[in-house]
Image: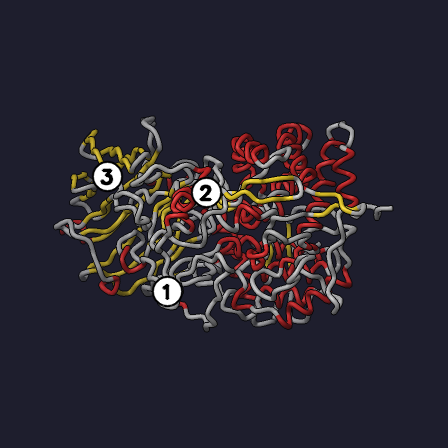
């Protein structure tokens, strides 16, 4: 029996350490529902230094005629910044406008074989700061709103209350995130004085705690909690934000603020071992001692617990939670490998586990940039939920995914309403949305299909982790409503079932052909597999299988094959564009085996992608897709190569983040989640007897069961 992995050593050998300031050099503490991102000071002292800088090479396009071309560039970390924010799953606000808007005005009616169907498509790729034509104003407002709020900032301040502007004033810097305890330790020299800062997040509450030790405190320096203006751009038709702060002094050491941003109101409780003094939209904690502790608790309502813990209690709670997190579930070690790439792959795997627990394990599906800063105004994309969270049950930590499943129950009626409005049965899940589950208008998102089976896939992963009948009964309504829509969306043609237009596949390159796109390869296989799983759930619950689900699953049309013997992306012209996501590969590996996909054809498809794909246009999770396909085809060496493939979209910063687009998408958590899912596939293959390539030792323990194949009998 292999020796147990020394998990503490495995984790801590990858603690990220910052020794100098960089615009993307940040660290984050959080608990999945709230997070705080800090700079080298251990606080949020230098926000301007980290603020996003517009990409000078970006060409503003609405994207209505196709995805914009991505400029070929060599990766340069200096092209990226990561802002300093404090964000939560509950903090959202909506803007006011200079005109009345109705959601239905963002819809276009498409003529389909089942009759006219409305889609909320009157919105392109514009950002709020771009020019937006009047015809898209309604769609744009509903696309941008609500926005996720920046809740406030903890920073170091001088004795006169002014902040610091230049991180170069800090010398001898060593700022380290101790992954094992979820604690940031910053040490540096400032104005001739040594400074030590410890920063932590409460693992159970919306709370942060800081301890600062320095002789600067006796000279009047302090720690400020301040409310910044909301950083997201407003469109020309949006009115200036109404923001207000009302402070209430409870004691010399405890102040409470009621902060209002448009329709969002929340409380902030600030407690300190020193004394608090009010500034404009801020309170400053100071002390005559050599150490100062500050605890900040945020809540979206007036309810206030009287037993708010101090710094030491929060620290102890964080240490306990994180030690248990790392000690349970799965671990993968590459120790003993002689391939020089092994330490980098192991580093990415360890840091990704931390980042996703902090950013992507809350009560709602996460945004693509988690709780770090806003992309797409902080809204979450349901087709990405799998990428953020499917790895949790694969790694034996399904409880972190389970937190967000309740949102689907809350959103079920809205998804049913979308299906009814379009003339379908069941529930149609949105692509981009927010806690309200309202669909965001988009000329791409409303036509995507691949998020539909995700809730079935995620629930099946959780079931496979060992959950019993009560779990199935609780969540079966989600499975049934999803499967009903999926079956009803298909059309029977010549004895098989097709996915008809309008649609856009996971590879969004075909957006201008949405009115004719038919039968995307990956979605055909996903439909068949998920409908089969839905009937499996019925069988486990003692119910008769649904004949319609079974008939559609068995008779989905086989994916189109090109003349060179590789899979097309879609069955209709242009059939294959070698840009963006190589989504055909997801039909085997990412997805368990089905009767629709031929492994030999998929092997040829992987070869073709490897040789001919435009990697500049790829995304960070495409490399895990390639790896999972390779692992399923028995090529562990190529799976490893895929995860480490040299590409400007496959670079991981010292803090574990995977930047994609300068000035906008400077972190990309779906890539981190995809990496962990791929490692689960890869390590499972090795555990089951596949031979790793020379120079690699892959040791794993605690991995959960992957979804099992559903190879149905071929249709008559």
- For marks 2 and 1 on the same chain, the one whose residue lies earlier in the sequence: 1
The residue at which mark 3 appears reads as 273
Q: Closer to the camera, 107 or 163?
A: 107
Q: Is residue 506 left or right of residue 636?
A: left
Q: Residues within 10 Å of mark 2 (few under 14, many from 20)?
A: many
Asked whether the beta carbons under mark 3 and mark 2 sit within 8 Å of each other, the answer is no
Residue 85 in sight from this viewpoint? yes
| Residue plotted at (24% across, 61% down) | 189
Measuring 71% from the left and 34% from the top, which residue is drawn there?
537
Q: Which label is found at residue 106? A: 2
Name the residue at the right extreme: 716
Camera sees residue 198: no
Residue 570 coordinates in the image, percent (x, y): 67, 57
Instruction: From the viewer's side, name the closer residue of 596 and 369.
Output: 596
Residue 56 picture quarter: bottom left
Residue 653 or residue 228, whichever sits in front: 228
Judged left or right of residue 196, residue 565 is: right
Residue of label 1: 55
């Amino acid at each position: 029996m292999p020796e147990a992995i020394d998990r503490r050593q495995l984790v801590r050998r990858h603690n990220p350490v910052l020794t100098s300031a960089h615009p993307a050099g940040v660290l984050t503490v959080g608990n999945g529902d709230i997070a705080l991102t800090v700079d080298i000071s251990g606080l949020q002292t230098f926000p301007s230094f980290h603020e996003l800088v517009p990409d000078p090479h970006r060409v503003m396009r609405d994207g209505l005629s196709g995805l914009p071309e991505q400029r070929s560039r060599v990766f340069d970390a200096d092209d990226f910044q990561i802002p300093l924010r404090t964000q939560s799953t509950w903090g959202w606000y909506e803007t006011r406008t200079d005109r009345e808007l109705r959601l239905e005005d963002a819809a276009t009616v498409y003529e389909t074989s089942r009759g006219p169907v409305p889609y909320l498509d009157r919105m392109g790729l514009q950002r709020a700061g771009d020019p937006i034509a009047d015809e898209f104003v309604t769609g744009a407002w509903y696309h941008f709103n609500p926005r996720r709020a920046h809740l406030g900032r903890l920073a170091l301040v001088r004795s006169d209350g002014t902040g610091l502007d230049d991180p170069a004033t800090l010398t001898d810097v060593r700022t380290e995130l101790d992954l094992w305890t979820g604690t940031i330790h910053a040490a540096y020299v400032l104005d001739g004085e040594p400074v030590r800062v410890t920063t932590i997040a409460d693992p159970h509450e919306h709370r942060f705690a800081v301890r600062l030790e320095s002789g600067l405190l006796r000279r009047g320096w302090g720690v400020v909690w301040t409310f910044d203006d909301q950083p997201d751009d407003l469109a020309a038709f949006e009115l200036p934000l109404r923001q207000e702060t009302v402070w209430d002094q409870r004691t010399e050491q405890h102040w409470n603020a009621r902060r209002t941003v448009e329709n969002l109101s929340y409380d902030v409780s600030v407690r300190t071992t020193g004394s608090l003094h009010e500034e404009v939209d801020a309170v400053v904690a100071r002390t005559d001692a050599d150490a100062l502790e500050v605890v900040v608790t945020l809540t979206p309502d007036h309810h206030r617990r009287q037993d708010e813990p101090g710094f030491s209690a929060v620290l102890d709670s964080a240490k306990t939670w994180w030690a248990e997190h790392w000690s349970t579930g799965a671990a993968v070690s590459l120790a003993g490998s002689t391939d020089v790439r092994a330490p980098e792959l192991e580093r990415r795997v360890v840091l990704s586990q931390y980042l996703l627990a902090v950013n992507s394990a809350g009560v709602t599906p996460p945004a693509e940039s988690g709780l770090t800063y806003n992309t797409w105004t902080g809204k979450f994309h349901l087709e990405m939920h799998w990428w953020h969270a499917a790895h949790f049950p694969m790694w034996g930590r399904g409880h972190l995914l389970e937190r967000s499943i309740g949102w689907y129950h809350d959103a079920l009626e809205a998804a049913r309403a979308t299906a009814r409005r379009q003339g379908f049965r069941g529930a149609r899940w949105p692509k981009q949305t927010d806690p309200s589950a309202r669909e965001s208008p988009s000329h791409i998102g409303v036509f995507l299909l691949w998020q539909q089976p995700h809730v079935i896939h995620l629930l099946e992963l959780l079931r496979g982790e060992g959950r019993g009948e009560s779990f199935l009964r609780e969540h079966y309504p989600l499975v049934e409503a999803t499967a009903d829509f999926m079956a009803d969306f298909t059309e029977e043609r010549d004895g098989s079932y097709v996915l008809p237009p309008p649609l856009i596949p996971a590879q969004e390159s075909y957006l201008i052909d949405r009115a004719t796109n038919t039968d995307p390869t990956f979605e055909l296989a996903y439909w068949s597999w998920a409908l089969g799983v839905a009937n499996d759930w019925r069988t486990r619950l003692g119910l008769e299988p649904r004949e319609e689900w079974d008939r559609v699953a068995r008779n989905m049309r086989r994916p189109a094959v090109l003349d060179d013997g590789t899979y097309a992306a879609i069955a209709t012209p242009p059939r294959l564009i070698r840009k963006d996501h190589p989504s055909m590969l997801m039909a085997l590996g990412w997805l368990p085996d089905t009767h629709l996909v031929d492994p030999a054809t998929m092997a040829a498809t992987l070869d073709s992608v490897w040789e001919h794909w435009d990697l500049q246009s790829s995304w960070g999770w495409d490399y895990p897709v390639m790896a999972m396909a390779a692992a399923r085809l028995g090529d562990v060496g190529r799976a490893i190569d895929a995860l480490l493939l040299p590409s400007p979209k496959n670079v991981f910063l010292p803090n574990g983040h995977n930047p994609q687009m300068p000035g906008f998408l400077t972190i990309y958590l779906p890539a981190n989640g995809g990496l962990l899912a791929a490692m689960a596939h890869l390590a499972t293959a090795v555990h089951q007897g596949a031979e790793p390539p020379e120079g690699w030792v892959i040791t794993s323990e605690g991995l959960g069961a992957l979804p099992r194949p559903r190879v149905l009998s071929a249709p008559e």
